[in-house]
Image (spheres, grey):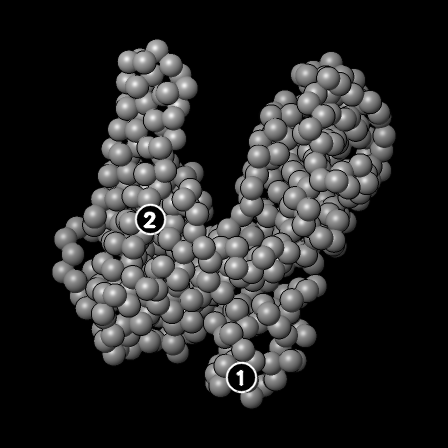
């Protein structure tokens, strides 16, 4: 990443409104053929891999998920070739790309309870593909743009054009919600025709709802914030989805495939790939680039290939990344002479035994945007940077707390880096340990019992104890 984009990134971060997990669908018109195989693992075309991410390198799990997907295709006599692929991502997600790729993430597989729920997730995405929802949305979106341009030209008013565009986008979001409900109905039909239990789509929605509530707890948000959709939402609320399924009147008996599913996911990584680094509560550690830092304790860290986003409970923000751009000379001089607009109060310093520089939001900036700091650290041949911002009532104290967090940046020793391993999901019998013991062993700093319950699709401890085998997480 070009570090000249630091100030732009800060501006974008100030507009962040939150993060939610769920079963979403994003499709393109990218042409694809059946993926090649390397040691039994699908090899995606480079353009598609850049869009969706890397494939999880587990041939057995890939084969299992594809078999479940092909069972849906065969059961409903769908025409065309379809491939079902597991992505090497810990986020909870599923999506599809025409003409025939359906993707699920490791994160989604971790929260599902059986094969029937996996079939429901795959069936929902197949519904989007069969009905060509992405192409329909693209046409509707272009219609909104054309109408807004025409209105602006006819009236000579940009304001009128923007009003038409705003109304059109609200209508398009309502249209997207209707497509989601349609994909639920279609996917459920595929599930039943393949011989799975008819309540699998409803229980899938329950799993996603439980995961969303856990995410809200971790971020300190109201637990019912996601239960009610707004006019600007592109997805229906969980309750709306379940009511629509009940109205469809499908209540067929069928298999769940829980034992087979647990066997397939046992030992699966539920972490980031090592070359992306690991989030450990409020700390971030990178075993291949060999560095670490610790965010304030109330921050939730989100890792992605471009960098690490940290969100505090007061919506203060931290963005971290590293660049291979060469910066000759002193970092404070580079910051003063190269970054535009020029940061204020630039100081040279040392962080983790390495050269560093810190600057503040440029003079003359809109003070309503709050406090911002930019921190550069030289790490070997790379330049690592922190973009920090806070606009709450306690912003002066918080920005200093964030600067102190940036100052925790340090190199990792070879032995420290070698000791880092991804967390893995394990399936065990409850006869081996009590729920309280399992919760205490989870490698997380908070909400351990809540995490254990959500991982196993249980709302209460009593529900969990009725299960013979349960999922847990081991370092």
Please give the name of the residue rendered at 23% of the width and 58% of the height, measured from the top-left corner.
Answer: 186
Q: Position of residue 189 (x, y in %)?
A: 21, 64
Q: Position of residue 222 (x, y in %)?
A: 58, 57
In the foreground, 32 or 94: 94
Q: Position of residue 181 (x, y in %)?
A: 29, 55
Q: Quadrant of the C terminus?
A: bottom right
Question: Which disc number belongs to residue 448?
Answer: none
Residue 171 visible in the current orientation: yes
Please give the name of the residue rendered at 58% of the width and 31% of the height, measured from the top-left corner.
Answer: 12
Which residue position is annotated with label 1? 462
- Lower position in the chain sequence, tag 2 or tag 1: 2
Q: Quadrant of the N terminus?
A: top right
- Local crowd size for mark 2, using a 10 Å CA cut-off: few (<14), some (14–19), many (≥20): some
**Relative to 366, residue 425 above or below:** below
Q: Is residue 39 left or right of residue 334?
A: left
Q: Position of residue 375 (x, y in %)?
A: 75, 31
**Relative to 93, residue 192 above or below:** below
In the foreground, 277 or 35: 277
Q: Are marks 2 and 1 in contact (CB under 8 Å)?
A: no
- Local crowd size for mark 1, using a 10 Å CA cut-off: few (<14), some (14–19), many (≥20): few
Q: Is residue 50 left or right of residue 327?
A: left
Please give the name of the residue rendered at 26% of the width and 28% of the height, measured from the top-left corner.
Answer: 143
Q: Secondary structure at mark 1?
A: helix
**Relative to 114, residue 22 above or below:** above
Q: Residue furthest top?
A: 156
Which residue position is annotated with label 2? 177
- Rendering quarter of residue 119: bottom left
Q: Is residue 109 left or right of residue 381?
A: left
């Amino acid at each position: 990443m070009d570090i000249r984009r630091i100030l732009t990134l800060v501006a974008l971060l100030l507009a962040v409104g939150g993060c939610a997990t769920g079963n979403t669908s994003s499709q393109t018109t990218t042409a694809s053929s059946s993926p090649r195989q390397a040691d039994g693992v699908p090899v995606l075309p480079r353009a598609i891999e850049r869009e969706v991410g890397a494939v999880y390198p587990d041939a057995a799990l890939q084969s299992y998920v594809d078999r479940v997907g092909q069972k849906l295709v065969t059961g409903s006599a769908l025409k065309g070739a379809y491939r079902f692929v597991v992505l090497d991502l810990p986020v909870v997600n599923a999506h599809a790309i025409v003409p025939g790729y359906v993707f699920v993430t490791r994160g989604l597989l971790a929260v599902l309870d059986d094969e029937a729920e996996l079939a429901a997730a795959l069936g929902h995405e197949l519904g989007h593909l069969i009905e060509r929802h992405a192409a329909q949305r693209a046409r509707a979106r272009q219609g909104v743009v054309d109408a807004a341009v025409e209105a602006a030209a006819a009236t000579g008013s940009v304001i009128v054009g923007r009003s038409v565009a705003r109304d059109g986008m609200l209508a398009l979001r309502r249209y997207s919600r209707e497509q989601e409900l349609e994909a639920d109905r279609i996917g459920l039909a595929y599930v039943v025709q393949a011989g799975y239990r008819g309540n699998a789509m409803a229980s899938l929605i329950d799993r996603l709802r439980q995961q969303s509530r856990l995410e809200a707890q971790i971020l300190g948000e109201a637990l019912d914030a996601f239960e009610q959709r707004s006019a600007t939402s592109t997805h229906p609320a969980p309750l709306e989805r379940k009511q629509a399924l009940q109205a469809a009147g499908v209540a067929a008996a069928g298999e769940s495939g829980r034992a087979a599913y647990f066997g397939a996911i046992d030992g699966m990584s539920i972490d980031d790939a090592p070359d992306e680094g690991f989030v450990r509560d409020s700390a971030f550690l990178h075993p291949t680039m060999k560095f670490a830092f610790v965010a304030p304790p109330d921050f939730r860290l989100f890792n992605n290939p471009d960098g690490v986003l940290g969100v505090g409970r007061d919506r203060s923000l931290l963005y971290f990344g590293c660049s291979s751009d060469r910066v000759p000379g002193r970092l404070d001089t580079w910051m003063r002479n190269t970054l535009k607009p020029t940061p204020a109060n630039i100081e040279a310093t040392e962080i983790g035994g390495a050269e560093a520089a810190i600057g503040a939001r440029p003079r003359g900036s809109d003070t309503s945007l709050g406090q911002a700091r930019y921190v550069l650290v030289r790490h070997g041949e790379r330049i690592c940077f922190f973009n920090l911002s806070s606009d709450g009532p306690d912003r002066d104290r918080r920005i200093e707390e964030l600067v102190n967090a940036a100052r925790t940046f340090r190199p990792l020793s070879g032995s420290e880096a070698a000791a880092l391993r991804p967390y893995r999901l394990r399936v065990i019998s409850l006869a081996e340990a009590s729920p309280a013991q399992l919760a205490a062993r989870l490698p997380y700093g908070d909400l351990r019992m809540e995490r254990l319950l959500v991982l196993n699709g249980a709302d209460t401890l009593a529900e969990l104890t009725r299960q013979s085998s349960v999922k847990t997480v081991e370092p």
